[in-house]
Image (spheres, grey):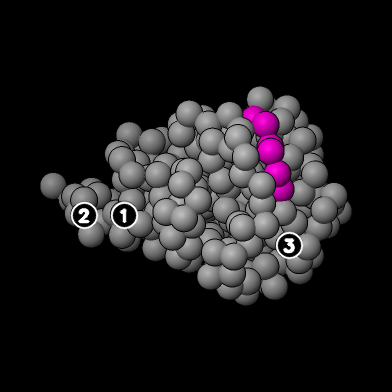
Amino acid sequence: MTRDHHIGMIVPSSNLTMETELPRMLRAREDVLPDDRFVFHAARARMQHVTPEQLRAMNAQAQRAAAELADARPDVVATACLVAIMAQGPGYHCTAEDDISAALRAEGSDAPVVSSAGALLSGIAALGATRVAIITPYMEPLTKAVVDYLEDAGVEVVDSLSLQVPDNLAVARLDPADLREHWRRLDLTGADALVLSACVQMPSLPSIEAVQDEAGIPVLSAATATTHRILTGLGLEPRVPGAGALLAG
């Protein structure tokens, strides 16, 4: 019997990529596991530039966005801006997930909550990795915040690359094919996994498997990690063709 799973997303107002890559992955899953279908609902929180000030302002809108999503009775809610959470300091994804859960419950929804920040940590753990290299689109201070966040959670970052793009729409326009060269600038010595895009707005899906084949280690992204958490939160097999080792099932 076919089942519809309703996916709620809290995204930055300037987000383009999460609403592209997440449905693309789950549609690919439908092609091989057709009994599960996915319906998407998004609520937006205002953010145009990836600065600490706008990230804090966006976080303040998350509970309002969650209340709006609750009206659609989603089966799971994902808040999809990794750096907005990681820039607030170590462990903040737990606070953010709890706050959104409370806002949903206040509106009669008991949907589980996934943050892209928490999902990246759990995705790295699911691969059995403890040492990673990462690529971000952020300015260097925000990349350092991501590195510090991961390391506080027990993940060693052996190398990082900042593409230094502050405009969020410009991040969405980055060519994912360029990542097939960018990763070569990293020193992967000792790395267990490569985070090809530590940002749900930076496109990476078309390059994940190609880079994984060339690098010889598991490759994931903030988007594939969020998809993994959504699927496991729904009690479904985390299998998406062409999306890297984390979603191999």
Mark 2 element type: helix
**Proximity of marks 1 and 2: CB atoms separated by less than 8 Å:** yes
Report the front residue among 7 and 196. 196
How far, Cα to Cα, is label 3 from label 2?
A: 35 Å
Q: Quadrant of residue 96?
A: top right
Location of the C terminus (image quadrant): top left
Residue designated by label 2? 32
Residue 163: which disc? 3
- Does the magenta-highlighted stretch encompass residue 156? yes
Using residue 7 as the reference point, say whether residue 53 is left or right of it. Answer: right
- Does the magenta-highlighted stretch encompass residue 167? no
Amino acid type shown at disc 1: Pro
**Circle 3: is it few (<14), some (14-19), or many (20+) Cα within 10 Å?**
some
The residue sitting at 54% across, 50% down in the picture is: 221
Residue 241: which disc? 1
Mark 3 element type: loop
Q: Earlier in the sequence, mark 3 or mark 2?
A: 2
Visible in this render: residue 63?
yes
Amino acid type shown at disc 2: Val
Visible in this render: residue 72?
no
Q: Which residues are magenta?
A: 155-160
The x and y percentages for residue 46 are: 72, 61
The x and y percentages for residue 194 are: 56, 46
Using residue 26 as the reference point, say whether residue 8 is left or right of it. Answer: right
Q: Is residue 26 above or below residue 100?
A: below
How far, Cα to Cα, is label 1 from label 2?
A: 8 Å
